[in-house]
Amino acid sequence: MHDLFNSIRAEWLKTRKRPAVWVLAGVLVSVLVAFGYALPWAVLSHPPPGTRFGPGTSPTQLKQLLYPAHFVGDALGGGGLAGPIALILGVLLVGSEYGWGTFKTILTQRPGRLHNLAARIVVLYATLVVYVLMVFAAAAGSSAVLALIDGAAIRWPGVWEVVRAMAAAVFIDGWWGLFGMAMAFLFRQSALALGLGLAYSFIIEGLVFNVLGALGSAVVRSVERFFPGQNAQALAASFTSGPGATSATIGATEATLVLCLYCLAAVAVSALLLRLRDVT
């Protein structure tokens, strides 16, 4: 146990001193504030001529989604970048070691390989907790500022709802981070792991399922239940409400169980690859 604590301390020291880790956090927060709050508010406050909104909705109603009562749903989405940012972080925590050639040095010393993997996973989740705190703080602050500008009443969601949403955000981001780590162990580098991981995230989970699902394909609706990204979206959607909210075809409990299985699979793949393969 002492060796594990030392490994965690060493990994955390490396991670918190890497500029790339905090650049990712800055990008995540900036995108959320700019495209999740500032731009929608500007468009809804001064809609371009000819702009059409959904039936039964108005700009005033849609602006309510930008106020504190609904900030939890916005924070969970992370401006649409929370998952990809977590994937990049997971890749960096592993792939950089192959690029620097430091895995050989690390694994010739105590503790063992699985201790080192466990330490990386702990540091991954610790970093994601910091990310989630920053995102939720930015979302809460932005929503409060917009409500004050519009003279709207400020109503906050319950504390328990916020805590549950933050736990869900860490859980969802954790899957993407573990997926990135597994990809880096598989390819023993960052570039290919990043490219294929992001391609899967944006093309398969983002484009294919969303486009075909919007067409009402029953086959797609049946297949998507087995994919992690769709379950992550369903879990996040369970915290959204109000105008424009969509009902997910996957329940929150089912989504949680599926993501748990995928997280365990990613850890198992990483452990097998690190334990059984040569690191050179």
Image (spheres, rainbow, N blue to C red):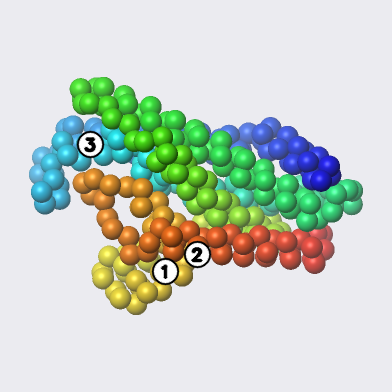
Mark 3 or 2, nearer chain start:
3
Quarter of the picture containing the C terminus is bottom right
Residue 201 visible in the current orientation: no
- CA gap between label 1 and label 2 equals 9 Å
Q: In this view, does 203 lie to the left or right of 68?
A: right
- Determine which residue is flagged by label 2: 258
Above or below, 170 against 45 in this view is below
Task: Name the image quarter holding residue 249.
Answer: bottom left
Find residue 276 and report its horizontal and vertical position in percent. 80, 67
What's the amino acid at mark 1?
Arg
Assign a secondary structure to mark 2. helix
Residue plotted at (73% across, 47% down): 119
Q: Residue beneath label 3, please?
A: 64
Q: Nearer the viewer, residue 249 or 186?
A: 249
Q: Name the residue under label 1.
A: 225
Task: Name, please, the residue furthest toward the right.
Answer: 109
Callout 1 touching callout 2 (CB < 8 Å): yes
Residue nearest the observer in this picture, 103 or 237: 237
